[in-house]
Structure formats: structure tokens, C-alpha cells
Image (cartoon, rainbow, N blue to C red):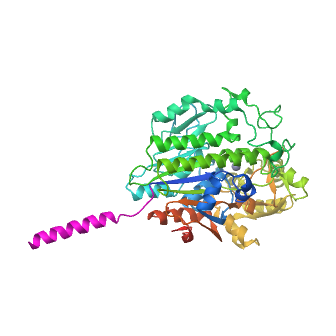
């Protein structure tokens, strides 16, 4: 009798502990909007759709209004890495999209990997993997936490926008091959594309978007948040003969798969692949949480070409709002309302087009880096008697030829102090800093902290250039860029929505590094291996 009693007691205990399993969403969807400044949430607010993406996230979700990037350079690879690792370039080793590597003595692209092959076509566009990333991402931690039963997929037009977030142990990352218009991957992940990706590639829907052309969603004269179309400082992305809206894209059909990236349709293609991945890989259909990391890259290409004050950028955000709204509706019907967790952020912001700023009496300018490089190299030769003492100016840093300096027994300190003096006197450069001695340099504390967070010695230059506000490198004939410490590059949106999220707004300052540890806390999993962020507790139900 007693035996039976204990037996039943055991059954009760085991079943009740089963029903008290850790609660997790069925699916986490991370959305990065490439080059989206925080103020774009409000700049175009009046025309975001009531049932679109941004207003839904703002009103039914939680917005961290003052989310800052805590490092420089504020570029794509570092941004995607930081969001998903909760860490900074000084720890992740991802110090730029491209860097001069002093160990390898060569220029390295953030996701390049010569040991893998392209899957999906015969180009070299797929020789990519996350191997240069030194830490785990939140997606790796989810995989580890569930003994690899969670599915993780990364998707973006840009290889680095899908690969770095998805992490080392991802099931797949897909990116867009601008030579062929195909979605591809690499042998790092698999040896053959899944049938559903092949089917999408066979449709070549990019040609349909070219056929349709790019006209504005609303009458052109209603774009009151933008300068009139066709300013001389916009890039001629669609050819020298393109005369503004409406853009006829017929000439690109079947021969140019590249320019779609600088249209809102690049984002639509990405959303289509994201939806197909959820359906065909059955993401979010069982009790094991899956993770889809999506990045919308087209906003960045449009922004670089036309600038944040252009009709092109405004129209791209109005269209992205619609795509996001549809995507959220799709998640509601496929996964179930409140069964999935969404966050939306950006990898960096953007500066105004310098010529636009100057036209409106705002201090700004361009620095021709090639001219600067040539002049410095020639000066160094005259002064120190050696050619090629300079290697690159990349990520606002000057990399010196350390092996040459060593072998010719020149004094590194003398070369550095000559350059620091020279660079500080150049128009548009506020300060040049010896990165090794940054601690003892008189520099604003915010700038100092951001630069130290970006400094991984063997993947960084020796001298850091700090430009004056709104001064940018290159883009001499038009367009703009990003990458510096200033708020226009470093203040990003951060929206949370769905499972476990309490609607609301937070005005205290939080950081890009806080995103991954907050997801870790929501999911009850370990923080990524290099995380330095803090949990944003206010968003939680
Ligand atoms: Zn960019």
C-alpha cells in the first residue's frame, strides 16, 4: 500500500515538474535595419501605416529610445556583431568590415574564409564563414542551451549581415550574390542548397521588380520630409542617364543584379526569403525555440547613394514599414500572436551628405583619403628615407608598415609623432590619437571609451583619426557614409515586441551591448561568451 502511495507521489511530482518547464517563445526574430538612425522612427512617423510595422512595434511593443553604440567604428560588421554578441570589437575581433591584419600581414574581410566554397553557384561570393569572430552570439547560446535542438538561420543581402548574427553553430546563413541574383551560402553550413531556396532562385523575382520600376508610393510633391528629388550631390546609382523618379529599371533585367540592393525591393526580397525560411524549415512549430536573424541591407545602399534627406530614403522607409507590417501579420498567422519574440535595431546610423549640410549652413565636409594617403607616404619618404611606410587608412585608422619600420631600424615613436602632428593640422580632422597611448591622451571621455572599445591591437591601425562632426571620408562626387563616434552614427532604434514583452518606453540610456544579454535573460540561457552588456529589465512582463 505504502509502495503504491510513493509510486503515485512520484508520478505527481514528475508530471507537475514537466508542466513547469521553462517558458520560452517558439521563435525569436531579430531584425536589423541597416543604417537606420533612431530618429527615422519619428522623421517619417506621420506616414507609417496604422497597421504597418513601425507603429505596431512602437505602440504594442517596447521602445528603448536612447540606445547608443558604445564603440567606434560604427559600421555594418561591428554593428551586427555587437547586437548579437553583446560585445565590442576589442573583444569580438570584428574591428571593421575590412581591416589590416598585423598577424597575417594582409587585408582581411570580416567574413572571408578561403577554406570553404560557395554553395548555390560557381562564383567566389560564398567563400564566407563566421570564423573571424572570436566570441559566441546569442544564437550560438540558444543552440548550446538546447543541445543544438534549436534551429538558427541568418538572412541578409549582405553576407556579413546574416553570417555574423547567426554565429558559429548556425544551421544556415543565406546571402545575396550580386553577380547572379541568387541566394547562396557556403560549405561551412551545408553542401547543397535546400530545394526551397533553389525554387526561389529559379523564380528570379528581382527581374519582376526591375520590370515594375521604382516609383514613389505617394505623389512626389507630398514627400515634405525630403529635399526635392535629383540633387547634384546624389549618386548616379541607376546610371548617368537616370533622371530621378520614376526610375525605369528595365535596362537591368537579366544583366545587373547589383542595383536592386539600392532599391526598396532589396528589402522585399529579403522579407520573402525570411517568410519562406520560416515555412519551409518549420521554424517555431514545436516546443524548442528557434531563431531567425534577418537584416535589411537595402536601406544602407539607398542611404549611401542618396543620403538621409532624399525622397529615395523616405520612400524606402515607407515601403519597409509595409514589408514589416506584412511580416508581423505573417508571424501572427504562422507562429501565433504572442508566441514569438521580435526585436528591431540597427547596426549604425548615417551622416548628412556634406554638400547638403553645407547648402544649409551646417558645418560639414569631405576628406579625400587617397590624396591624404599619397601625401603622407611621400612626406614620410622625404623625412625618413623609406618608401611605403604607410599601409592603409581604414576604419578611420592609419596602419603603419611595422615590419619595414623594424627591419630598417627606424623609430616607430618618431614616425608616429610626425604623423600625429601632421594629421592634426589637416582640414576636417579634429584630432589624431596614438591608440597605444590613448589612456594618457586629452580626449573627451565618451570618445575615449568608444575608441578603446573598438581597439583590438592586431586588427587595428596605430593612429586614430577623429574627424570634425559631419565630415566624412571620400564620397567626393555625392552620397554619404557612417563609421564615427558621433550621435548621428551611434544612436540607433531598439524595439521589442511579442512574447514576454511589456508595452512601454524607456528614456534612460542603454547600449547596443545590452541587446544580447537581455535576450539571454528572457530565454533563460547563457549570455554570449564576450558579453559586456546589461539586462534591460524594464521591457519584461
Ligand atoms: Zn553602410
Indicate whether residue 24 is drawn in magenta.
yes
Indicate whether residue 518 is drawn in magenta.
no
> Which corner quadrant of the image does residue 406 belong to?
bottom right
Give the x, y percent position of residue 527: 48, 64
Q: Is residue 226 left or right of residue 173?
A: right
Q: Residue at x 70, y 61 (%)?
A: 490
Does 79 appear above or below 447?
above
Q: Residue at x 84, y 52 (%)?
A: 354
Q: Kindly tell me whether residue 372 is visible in this rendering.
A: yes
Does 250 appear above or below 354?
above
Q: Residue at x 38, y 54 (%)?
A: 287
Q: Kindly tell me whether residue 136 is visible in this rendering.
A: no
Residue nearest the observer in this picture, 481 or 23: 23
- Which quadrant is home to the N terminus? bottom left
**Residue range (magenta):** 1-25
Residue nearest the observer in this picture, 100 or 44: 44
Amino acid at each position: 500500500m505504502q509502495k503504491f502511495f510513493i509510486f503515485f507521489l512520484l508520478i505527481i511530482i514528475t508530471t507537475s515538474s514537466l508542466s513547469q518547464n521553462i517558458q520560452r517563445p517558439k521563435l525569436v526574430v531579430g531584425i536589423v535595419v541597416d543604417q537606420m538612425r533612431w530618429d527615422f522612427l519619428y522623421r517619417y512617423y506621420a506616414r507609417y501605416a496604422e497597421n504597418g510595422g513601425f507603429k505596431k512595434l512602437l505602440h504594442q511593443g517596447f521602445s528603448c529610445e536612447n540606445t547608443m553604440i558604445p564603440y567606434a567604428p560604427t559600421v555594418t560588421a561591428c554593428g551586427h556583431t555587437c547586437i548579437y554578441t553583446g560585445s565590442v570589437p576589442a573583444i569580438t575581433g570584428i574591428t571593421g568590415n575590412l581591416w589590416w591584419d598585423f598577424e597575417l600581414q594582409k587585408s582581411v574581410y570580416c567574413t572571408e574564409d578561403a577554406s570553404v566554397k560557395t554553395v548555390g553557384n560557381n562564383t567566389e561570393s560564398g567563400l564566407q564563414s563566421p570564423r573571424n569572430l572570436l566570441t559566441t552570439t546569442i544564437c550560438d547560446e540558444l543552440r548550446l542551451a538546447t543541445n543544438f535542438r534549436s534551429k538558427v538561420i541568418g538572412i541578409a543581402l549582405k553576407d556579413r549581415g546574416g553570417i555574423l548574427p547567426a554565429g558559429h553553430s548556425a544551421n544556415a546563413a543565406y546571402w545575396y550574390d550580386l553577380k547572379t541574383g541568387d541566394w547562396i551560402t557556403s560549405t561551412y553550413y551545408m553542401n547543397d542548397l535546400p530545394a526551397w531556396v533553389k525554387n526561389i532562385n529559379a523564380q528570379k523575382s528581382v527581374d519582376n521588380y526591375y520590370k515594375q520600376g521604382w516609383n514613389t508610393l505617394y505623389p512626389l510633391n507630398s514627400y515634405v520630409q525630403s529635399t526635392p528629388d535629383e540633387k547634384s550631390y546624389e549618386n548616379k546609382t541607376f546610371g548617368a542617364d537616370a533622371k530621378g523618379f520614376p526610375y525605369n529599371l528595365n535596362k537591368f533585367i537579366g544583366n545587373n543584379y547589383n542595383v536592386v540592393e539600392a532599391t526598396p525591393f532589396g528589402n522585399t526580397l529579403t522579407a520573402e526569403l525570411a517568410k519562406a525560411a520560416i515555412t519551409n524549415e518549420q521554424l517555431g512549430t514545436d516546443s524548442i525555440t528557434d531563431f531567425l536573424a534577418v537584416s535589411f541591407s537595402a536601406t544602407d545602399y539607398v542611404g549611401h547613394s542618396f543620403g538621409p534627406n532624399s525622397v529615395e530614403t523616405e520612400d524606402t522607409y515607407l515601403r519597409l514599414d509595409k514589408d514589416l507590417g506584412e511580416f508581423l501579420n505573417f508571424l501572427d498567422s504562422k507562429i501565433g500572436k504572442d508566441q514569438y519574440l521580435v526585436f528591431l535595431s540597427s547596426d549604425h546610423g548615417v551622416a548628412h551628405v556634406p554638400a547638403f549640410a553645407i547648402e544649409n549652413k551646417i558645418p560639414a565636409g569631405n576628406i579625400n583619403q587617397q590624396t591624404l594617403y599619397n601625401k603622407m607616404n611621400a612626406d614620410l619618404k622625404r623625412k625618413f628615407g623609406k618608401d611605403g611606410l604607410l599601409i592603409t587608412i581604414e576604419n578611420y585608422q592609419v596602419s603603419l608598415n611595422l615590419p619595414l619600420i623594424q627591419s630598417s631600424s627606424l623609430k616607430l615613436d618618431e614616425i608616429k609623432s610626425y604623423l600625429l602632428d601632421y594629421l592634426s593640422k589637416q582640414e576636417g580632422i579634429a584630432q589624431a590619437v596614438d591608440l597605444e597611448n590613448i589612456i594618457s591622451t586629452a580626449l573627451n571621455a565618451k570618445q575615449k571609451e568608444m575608441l578603446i572599445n573598438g581597439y583590438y591591437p592586431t586588427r587595428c591601425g596605430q593612429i586614430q583619426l577623429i574627424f570634425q562632426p559631419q565630415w566624412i571620408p571620400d564620397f567626393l562626387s555625392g552620397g554619404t557614409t557612417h563609421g564615427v563616434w558621433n550621435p548621428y552614427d551611434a544612436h540607433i532604434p531598439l524595439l521589442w515586441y511579442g512574447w514576454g514583452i511589456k508595452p512601454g518606453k524607456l528614456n534612460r540610456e542603454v547600449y547596443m551591448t545590452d541587446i544580447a544579454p537581455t535576450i539571454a535573460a528572457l530565454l533563460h540561457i547563457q549570455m554570449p561568451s564576450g558579453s559586456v552588456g546589461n539586462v534591460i529589465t524594464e521591457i519584461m512582463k
